[in-house]
Image: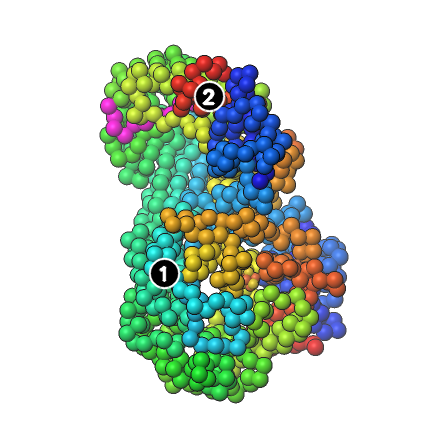
Amino acid sequence: MKSSMYNLFVPIDESEYVLYNFLNDSALIVDEDMKLCIEKGELNSSISNQSVKETLLNCGVIVHDDINERKLYLYRYNIEKYAPSYSLFIVLTTFACNLSCPYCYEGSGEILNSSMDEQTLLKVIDFIKKTTHEDGTREIAIKLYGGEPLLCLDSCYAISKELSKWGDENNIKVNIVLQTNGTLLNENAVRLLTPYLAAVEVTLDGPPESHNKSRCYKNGDGSYEDILRNISLLAGSKTSILLRLNVENSDGLGLLLDNLDKNGLKSWPNLSFYTAHISYYDLCEFFTNDELCLKDINTVLEIRPSLLRVIYEKGWQSKYHMYNMRKQKLVSCNNEKRGRYVVDPLGDIYKCVFTAGDKAHRVGVIKDGGVEWNSAYYDILTRNPLDMEGCADCVYLPNCGGGCASRAFLNKESFNASYCGPIKRIMSKRILLYLKEIYPEKFSRLVI
Amino acid sequence: MKSSIYNICIQTDGCNSIIFNALKGTSILVDSEMKTAIESNSLEMICPEDLFTLVDSGFLVEDDLDERNVYAFEHNQNKYSTDISSFLVLPTLSCNLSCPYCYEDSLNISRSRSMDRNIAENVTNFIKNQVMENHSRSVVLGLYGGEPLLESDLCIQIAESISKWTMSRGLNYFSALTTNGTMLSQETFDKLRPFISSVHFTLDGPEEEHNKMRFYKGGRGTYSDLMKAISLAGESNIHLTVRIHIGDRTGQGDFAKVLGDLEAIGLRGRPRTYLYFMPIEPKDECFNTSSKKSLRRKLKNIELLPCIWNMARELGWGESLHVDAGQEHSLLPFSRLPCGFLKNGCYVIDPSARLYSCPSVAGIERYSVGSISQDGTAIWLPSYYDAITASPTDATACKDCSHLPLCNGGCPVRPSSAQEPDGCHLKEFYNKKILTHLAHKYPTLIWGT
Ligand code: SF4
Ligand code: SF4
Ligand code: SF4
Ligand code: SF4
């Protein structure tokens, strides 16, 4: 027997620790003696109680001598990376946008503003079909994205219609999601698209006043009322409405939910929502900078209990998609896996939506005869954390996967490099908050 | 632009050479000037038109492309993707024959073990669980042994259950029975037929040869019984595969005789009939690819194949041969895995529900890499993780080898040929394959010695 490489001890008071095993996703409470014993690997001499030993073994805290846990990790990592259960195509029909949100990473469609032309559109549809066959997946998700995708309603319609038909013919499940700012979702768009759409995803930036300050038209007018009116066209339809509610704190969320209630949204059977808190609302937290990212993740963790309280108090819990704090991250990001593609209006392919348009991050180009992958594609896909600086010996590896590849590229000019970001500074807190959430009595005195 | 690291250059005569790109499977005939230009990366000597062709076919690649990553990607994709899950089930290790070359014998497998019905139930549950977990679109079931038809009820039980289940889920299903043919009665075949897609038979050459190799325990040869079985199966529309062994003494005339016998039972021109020729390998061939002696024999056998193919084609068997590059039994199958068995989503299951990474050791407990539990899930041993995550791209000798995309580093569970003190023999083996393949495909080209 030996101790696992992936044990982390998080102190909860003077004498006790939470022992979390990252590879096995298990948690135990241990005292100082046990901690020392496990840390020193003095397992046979010090742990005589057979049932204790068994528990430790079941939790993966101690492991058999002949197992190489790195290989076990790598095996799971590769399966997750190379055997995706579905293929995802995020299609940017245009970079242009009719709003000008101050935080927009795409520059509100003013820096890049091209839209997909008809020829490219056909090639993209073809690419999706061929690639799905190559991926061998039974299910695909297509996300219509932008800019504001509805500025190119024709493209959205062509993609949705053609690929739905193709999915039916080929026994492939096609889920199409429209990610829109909601302002252009008029009757015509709804009529054309809803037969094909699994869901429409719309963002609200807090209660009306704050939303109207940040999500405004180019002339400065707010968009809240328009969005609510437009999505009401979908109320009760087959297409789900997924709201992303950006919130600063529980008060803001409370006000927003009240307003939605007043407008009748609570009774829409096809509506659900999730909450987000990010300084740059349209960016992935890992793509900003380490300090902001740390601050954002901290805030998300800290406001979570109070958000939950408000949601339950106001009776919205059945519509709430709770962020899963427990998720293991064998691979650092969903985008890093095989079968994940972001296609921009020019027919260029990227792995991450936040790098779309920046040619240094481009991984392939859709040509007439098919797609041409470049070195970035292979570099990202063959990224192996066990070969990257620090990761092979890092206790956090099964929950980090070596960090964001795009950030690694920006910082170290190589996709095959690690990027810790704030992972090491946030993990203990996340574990404790999670435990406190599911075992409130046990951890009631714990201040995090 | 730079030259691909996977260009293999083979001199054909005094002034010409073949360059074969192992990653793309492309080949080109070049003169010595072009050869030097490509080999020494002196691309300024090449005219734009030629340059375009060379890039297009993968002989030259972009400067920033690390082709090792391209290979590693394809290797991993092949190894870990599970759009197909395949299960090779051995319902029994027993056999009613005693073929002298059978590896199961040489490995001292106790020859009486069969699967009991409960284990068969666990195995079918395991298959279903695993297919779901793998998100596969297709399921391949192989019934193998020993002689699986010694346990024909088990074969039916398993195949029926999986076949119906895949149908109800809208999954593709393909199943193959590998049998020595001696136990395939009409009744057994009729019961199995609805649940299997294909039967695999093996012939050891013409009647006399075959009977010397494949006989009942008393010594009587099996050729005529086997022909009856093939004919019986052939009357249905099932997919048929006939593997014909090339022995040391089998000559052209012998193959003509075998094909004549197959024609007599109506196989020539029969749709869904697939024929391939394989040298008889010694008992432990896979294990010994590295020895010089084995290499010499292999080289000889490779030369034989095109003659046999041509003859078969002339006799009207062209449609049943699938020997183009990229096809499974061609000289250049272009797989990115050294062995189709050590792959995520591929499971070799013995009668005790133990799991193996290779059929040639199935049944020998010390080689098992895991087992199927009562609740139908796999419990892997540490050795499995070591074996499956091992990649030839990590092996010092193989990682920069120009032949890597063809050879893939050799048998993943045996010591690699690359470690031989006098260098890796397998390169020569693959060069021979390339040349033989090209000579067969382009017979009008003028070849040197
Ligand atoms: S690749 Fe990086 S920036 Fe892009 S979504 Fe993933 S973690 Fe975020
Ligand atoms: S990126 Fe950093 S935190 Fe993540 S596994 Fe590697 S060393 Fe650990
Ligand atoms: S085993 Fe030999 S031929 Fe094969 S990749 Fe390794 S060095 Fe090359
Ligand atoms: S693992 Fe594959 S190559 Fe190796 S002995 Fe088994 S079948 Fe042959």
The residue indicated by pointer 1 is: B116
Q: Nearer the viewer, residue A4 or A266?
A: A4
Residue drawn 46% across the image and 59% down it: B348
The answer to whether A252 is drawn above or below residue B369 in the figure is: above
Which residue is under mark 2? A433
Query: Amino acid type of disc 2?
Result: Leu
Q: Residue visible at 58% across and 66% down? A: B286
**Which quadrant of the figure has residue A390?**
top right
Is B416 or B396 nearer to us in this picture? B416
On the question of residue B409 being in view, the answer is yes
Asked if both marks, 1 and 2, belong to the same chain, the answer given is no
Camera-nearest residue between B141 and A4 = A4
Can you say which quadrant of the picture contains the N terminus of chain A?
top right
Amino acid type for the residue under numbered disc 1: Asp
Which residue occupies 36% across, 53% down?
B122
Q: Indicate yes or no whether the magenta region holds residue A182.
A: no
Judging depth in this view, the residue of A227 and A184 nearest the camera is: A227
Q: Which scheme is used to colour this image of the protein?
A: rainbow
State whether label 1 is within 8 Å of ligand 4. Answer: no
Q: Secondary structure at mark 2?
A: helix
Q: Position of residue A422 (x, y in %)?
A: 57, 25
- Residue at the (48%, 82%) spot, across then down: B210
Q: Chain of mark 2?
A: A
| Chain letter, disc 1 residue | B
Q: Is residue B155 above or below residue A272?
A: below
**Count of residue discs:** 2
In the rendered image, the vertical position of residue A394 relative to residue B380, given as above or below: above
Q: For the magenta stretch, what is the residue range? A: A267-280
Q: Could you tell me which secondary element the residue under label 1 belongs to? A: loop
